[in-house]
Amino acid sequence: MNTDDIAGFFARRQDLDPEAYLELDFAFECAGDPREAAAHLASEQSTAQWRRVGVDEDFRPRFAAKVVDLDATPREKFSVPVDGVPATDVHRVRVTLAHPHGNFGPRLPNLLSAVCGEGVFFVPKIPLIRLLDIRFPAAFLAAFAGPRFGIAGLRDLLRAYDRPIFFGVIKPNIGLPAEPFAEIGYQAMAGGLDIAKDDEMLADAPWCPLGERAALLGEAARKAGEETGEPKIYLANITDEVDRLIPLHDLAVARGAGAVLVNAMPVGLSAVRMLRAHASVPLIAHFPFVASFARLPWFGIHSRVLTRLQRLAGFDAVIMPGFGPRMMTPEAEVQDCIRACLEPMGDILPSLPVPGGSDSAATLERVFAKVGGVDFGFVPGRGVFGHPMGPAAGARSLRQAWDAIAAGVPVAERAAKHPELAAALAAFGG
């Protein structure tokens, strides 16, 4: 690009209509002039090859993504070795682009194709790039319904206020025949879980068919609710081919499921948006495939971007990699995803963040402190279903730990009078 071409992809934020653009934060490493690299990035995802030979025209004023902020720092070499790009005159760059959303409209597949497709990850001289964040104007958000229930709606369904919502992943993860599987779920709900859920790997399996499982677990939720005086929900995994999502939702709900689980990225966000328009119960997202986009700090897509998009598509709760070494996710990134669920987003309701990974009564106090409030879901698997005294005791240990936290009493001190909690601390740490 010549100097004039580069300048055509830069703008002052105050000179743009904020409702006409969404904003994208990128970090990248480039060879050569960082301004030219940023201009290429803007061009490739919007008006690449914007001039025809011999024709005096310029599509950039209407269609080009524009660089509105740029900070570049020289480096000796790329963070990791790369092929095909000389490691000379290397810069680490943080850049914000304003992208006109009229280019793709309120369509999630087209949005993804523009802001994290070929035009981003194949830019000349930018071998390492990561989409860090995305922000939407009200004009774009207005076309999306977002969550139907959100946090307040989930709390109303469960009559669970001023505390975390307690999920539990019924184990083993690939399931059992429906009857023993439902019995395990019943024990945990009777012990204090709000929601007993399928693992993300268990869908409509021949050894544990969804219809049979939903009938038995729906009845288990009803029975546990009557016994405890607290509503309970069975969360059924309906992840499948797109054309089966609505039939499986209808089957699960008719048989007794109070919410449905969908693996967001394998199924696709557009499919989730379709399901949201039909669903009569809360939609809960799980995170398979997310790490393949988000794990590397110098390439791919930050997981908070995917969290924002799941909320936009209509998930009422988003299960995400949580705190601690098990999930290999930096603490700051987990907190970024939690904020992406909770912070204002036009008229889109907040989604319940559910950070998870090897949690138990022994980790509840730590997770509560890191989240900084009660608006989160807590989702043990082994911490409930692998409890030495059984699933009911595992669920009771969670409620005992929370009672201690709410009362300002050390959890270990409360454990002295509650054997379930003491067993959880001994088995799972703390």
Image (tube, grey):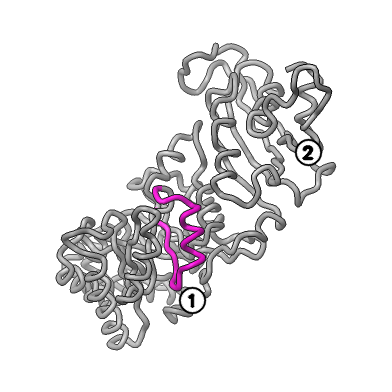
Is the residue marked by circle 1 packed among few (<14), some (14-19), or many (20+) residues within 10 Å?
few
Magenta stretch: give its range. 266-286
Q: Which residue is mark 2?
A: 62
Report the side of 338 relative to 56 (left or right). left
**Quarter occupied by the N terminus:** top right
Q: Which residue in the structure is indicated by mark 1?
A: 162
Instruction: Count the numbered circles shown.
Output: 2
Residue at 22%, 71% in the rendered image: 212
Label 1 element class: loop
Mark 2–mark 1 Cα distance, whole angstroms, equals 48 Å
Q: Tell me the SS state at disc 2.
A: helix
The image shows residue 137, relative to residue 188, as above or below, that is: above
Where is 140 relative to 70, above or below? below
- Residue at image point 45% right, 73% down: 280
Looking at the picture, how far across and down is residue 5, in whole percent?
Answer: 77, 22
Look at the image and say whether residue 127 sits in the magenta stretch: no
Q: Earlier in the sequence, mark 2 or mark 1?
A: 2
Q: Residue at x 37, y 74 (%)?
A: 258
